[in-house]
Image: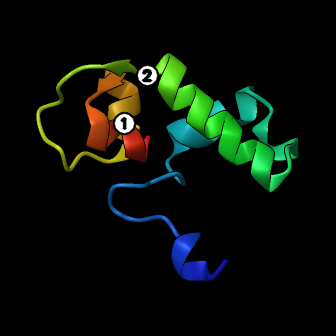
Amino acid sequence: MTRKFLSPTDLLDYDAATIQRLIEARGRHGLSPADRIGAAYDFVRNDVLFGYNADDALPASRVLADGYGQCTPKAFC
């Protein structure tokens, strides 16, 4: 993969402290890349509730703080 697809964006702010703490707390750093993808998918599907946020253009850290999101914001979480 190129750096373009691995860099944080305004919506996908995985470098935010809250997201990094969550990754560390769940021990995700030691997983293979494929297992990290699966773990992220499972987390969003199972642990982030479905609900309507104030805006579709919220960063992942905000969706995580809210604890819910509709399809688009949940996808970035």
**Where does the image place residue 34, in percent across and percent down from the top left?**
77, 51
**Where does the image place residue 35, in percent across and percent down from the top left?**
78, 43
Q: Secondary structure at mark 1?
A: helix
Badge 2 local density, few (<14 within 10 Å), some, or many (20+)? some
Q: Is residue 21 visible?
A: no
Q: Amino acid at mark 2?
A: Val
Total labels: the figure holds 2
Label disc, if present, on residue 74 of the rendered structure: 1
Image quadrant containing the C terminus: top left
Camera-side residue: 59 or 32?
32
Q: Is residue 17 above or below residue 48?
A: below
User: In the visual, does 43 lie left or right of 55?
Assistant: right
Question: Residue at image x 85%, y 50%?
Answer: 32
Residue 55 picture quarter: top left
User: In the visual, does 31 lie left or right of 9?
Assistant: right
Q: Is residue 60 above or below residue 6?
A: above
Q: Which residue is mark 2?
A: 48
User: In the visual, does 62 lie left or right of 3?
Assistant: left
Camera-side residue: 33 or 30?
33
Snapshot colouring: rainbow
Q: Which comes before the other along the chain, label 1 or label 2?
A: 2
User: In the visual, does 21 lie left or right of 24?
Assistant: left
Question: Residue at image x 61%, y 38%?
Answer: 40
Question: Residue at image x 67%, y 77%?
Answer: 1
Question: Residue at image x 28%, y 43%?
Answer: 72
Label disc, if present, on residue 3 of the rendered structure: none
Q: Secondary structure at mark 2?
A: loop
User: Is the C-beta separation of discs 1 and 2 under 8 Å?
Assistant: yes
| Label 1 to label 2: alpha-carbon separation | 7 Å
Q: Amino acid at mark 1?
A: Lys
